[in-house]
Amino acid sequence: MKPNEQFGIRIQHAGIHVRNYKETFEWYHRVFGFEEVPRRTEGKNPFGGGVFPKMRWIHMGDFFLEVYEVQNAEPFSLVDFEFSLGVKHLNFEIADLQGWLEYVKQFDDVEILVNNRYSETAGAVYIKDNNGILVEVTSA
């Protein structure tokens, strides 16, 4: 049995903690093309109150990031990641990896940590987002 086929399971979103929602949205918009999900203005505000009063959604196609603005948080440590539980990184697959790399090199806030070239057109690149979150980018 394949539960994903039997029950219609697919990946829909990931949640991330960030220092500043607006700066994070702008980074993901500029680097990957994410768009904001408009807040509901009628009825009860789904983003107000609770443990995380500053939560917003951004999306690229049918994949969403649930972005929580939290204070006094420290970035994931690349030194300790082998000894930590939880999500190690986000991954994005890009058809024109080399073209995208040339595009993002113009931004001071995109740190390329690793650029593994398997061939002239294929490979994997690791970058950090503006919050220190590890992001893997692979060629399609």
Image (cartoon, grey):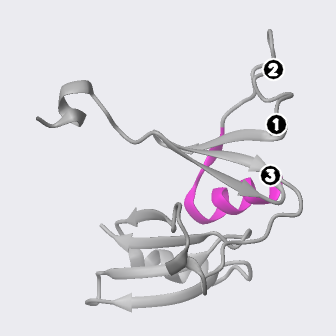
Q: Mark 3: which secondary structure?
A: helix
The crowd level at tag 3 (other Cα within 10 Å; few <14, some 14-19, many 20+) is some
Q: Mark 1: which secondary structure?
A: loop
Residue 102 or residue 88, whichever sits in front = 88
Q: Amino acid at mark 3?
A: Tyr
Placement of the N terminus among the 4 image quadrants: top left
Q: Residue, x 69% and y 73% (percent of image)?
A: 132
Q: Which mark is residue 45?
A: 2
Residue 98 visible in the current orientation:
no
Q: Amino acid at mark 2?
A: Asn
What main secondary structure does the magenta stretch of the protein show?
Answer: helix
Placement of the C terminus among the 4 image quadrants: bottom left
In the rendered image, residue 116, in percent from the top left (x then y), is placed at 38, 90
The crowd level at tag 1 (other Cα within 10 Å; few <14, some 14-19, many 20+) is few
Q: Mark 2: which secondary structure?
A: loop
Residue 127 or residue 79, whichever sits in front = 79
Tell me the residue that label 3 is attached to: 21
Does label 1 or label 2 sit earlier along the sequence? 2
Residue 3 or residue 132, whichever sits in front = 3
- Is 85 situated left or right of 9 in this image? right
Residue 93 visible in the current orientation:
yes
CB under 8 Å between discs 2 and 3 = no
Magenta stretch?
21-36
Mark 1 or mark 2, whichever is nearer to me: 1
Residue 96 or residue 60, whichever sits in front = 60
Q: Quadrant of residue 5?
A: top left
Q: Amino acid at mark 1?
A: Val
Tell me the residue that label 1 is attached to: 51
Gap in angstroms between the C-alphas marked 1 and 2:
14 Å
Image height of 69 relative to 114, above or below: above
